[in-house]
Image (cartoon, rainbow, N blue to C red):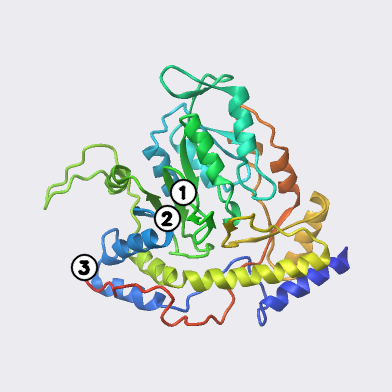
Amino acid sequence: MRACFQNILDFIKSKFPGQNHVPLHAPIFQGNERKYVLNAIDSTFVSSVGAYVNRFEAMMCEITGANHAIAIVNGTNALHMALLLANVQPEDEVLSQSITFIATCNAISYIGAYPVFIDIDRDTLGLSPESLQHFLNNHAERKSDGFTYNKQTGKRIKACVPMHTFGFPCRIDDIATICSQWNITLVEDAAESIGSFYKGKHTGTFGKIGAFSFNGNKTVTAGGGGALITNDETLAKRAKHLTTQAKVPHPWAFVHDEVGYNYRMPNLNAALACAQLEQLDLFIDNKRDLASSYQSFFERQQTPYVREIDQAKANYWLNCILLKDKNERDAFLKFTNENDVMTRPAWELMHRLSMFNYPSKTDLSNSEWIADRLVNIPSSVRIPLKNTKTGTRDSQTSCQTR
């Protein structure tokens, strides 16, 4: 076993030459990041109003194909706002998956709603349409008010939040069809999947609204940042209103017409995000090249490697391998981290956390099987990059205007 681990360790290090410590996913700043951030500082517009915020939203529409994008301060707040826009109420239930980052369930809990966990597909690591359909057929009913209710708890099932785990698109079109049949609002947790597509459509565009994260460890980073995308103009306008403290536009008066949120992305972060989005195509090509190398290597090692499914194009935010069992997984994690290669397991399953131990139970055998075996391995964009000085996407403006 140790010899196999050493082979893997040596191969990973060969993909990141010259690094004494190989991180899991480090940001790379080789484009216009410094120029744009300094420009934002010089403009004095460093908070939630500024030309870079507007440009970031335009770029997100261009990249995803959505009609509207709203810049949000981080991915967790983006999910919270998405659920508010979906009209999730206290005591409602929201269907999601147990293998996810805790932000998904925290956002549900901020509203006073309850996450109900549906199993995943092993090949996508995302919510399984088959498991979703089985749960609804056996545990849910449509009532005369048009909504779907959990027969066990009596609570309304208002939304479904599947996640494109580690950047791998799930079977989101089938999930969208099922949600439509049951009048359940689909909110996509696309936090990790900027640049990922399924059947030619960008993740986050299949549901009512999609939420993204631009944290420091993501494919594209704003330091801290998030975004919402939607094709619904009314929802987009409401999102901008609520995320700017529900302030009624006025030249000088401070009038607010409902409880709002301080959720808008600052211009400084947006400046960084714009420079990063200019390089998105280069980043994705670089990461997919690394994924191809990993795939070939692990096939020779006879170690299962997670690949995108047919008709999907993943950004391979984090590359994943599957080991024999939890004991082998933990031994591998210990060996690699002690030898200066950062690896991580999947998150602790949400249904195993005390605050999400909700009584509505479903079979989660696939989630548990994956969680015991999956390891994330180093997945950073590797340098040098081609054309990093100007990027690959035209920013259309230096954003010097206010």
For the point 64% across and 30% down, the residue is 134
Residues at marks 1 and 3, CA–CA distance in whole angstroms: 28 Å
Three-letter residue code for mark 1: Thr
Question: Which mark is drawn over residue 301?
Answer: none
**Element on which disc 1 rests:** helix
Three-letter residue code for mark 2: Gly
Residues at marks 2 and 3, CA–CA distance in whole angstroms: 22 Å
For the point 60% across and 23% down, the residue is 139
Residue 354 in view of the camera: no
Q: Nearer the viewer, residue 333 or 94?
A: 94
- Label 3 crowd (10 A; few <14 / some 14-19 / many >=20): few
Q: Which residue matches tag 2?
A: 226
Location of the C terminus (image quadrant): bottom left
Residues at marks 1 and 2, CA–CA distance in whole angstroms: 8 Å
Residue 143 image offset from top left, x and y in percent: 47, 18
Residue 261: image quadrant is top left
Q: Could you tell which of marks 2 and 3 lies nearer the N-terminus?
A: 2
**Above or below 172: residue 152:** above
Question: Which mark is drawn over residue 76?
Answer: 1
Location of the N terminus (image quadrant): bottom right
Residue 284 image offset from top left, x and y in percent: 54, 68
Residues marked 1 and 3 touching at CB (< 8 Å)? no
Q: Which residue matches tag 3?
A: 402
Residue 256 image offset from top left, x and y in percent: 21, 41
**Above or below 290: residue 124:** above
**Above or below 39: residue 228:** above
For the point 11% across and 52% down, the residue is 251
Residue 223: image quadrant is bottom left
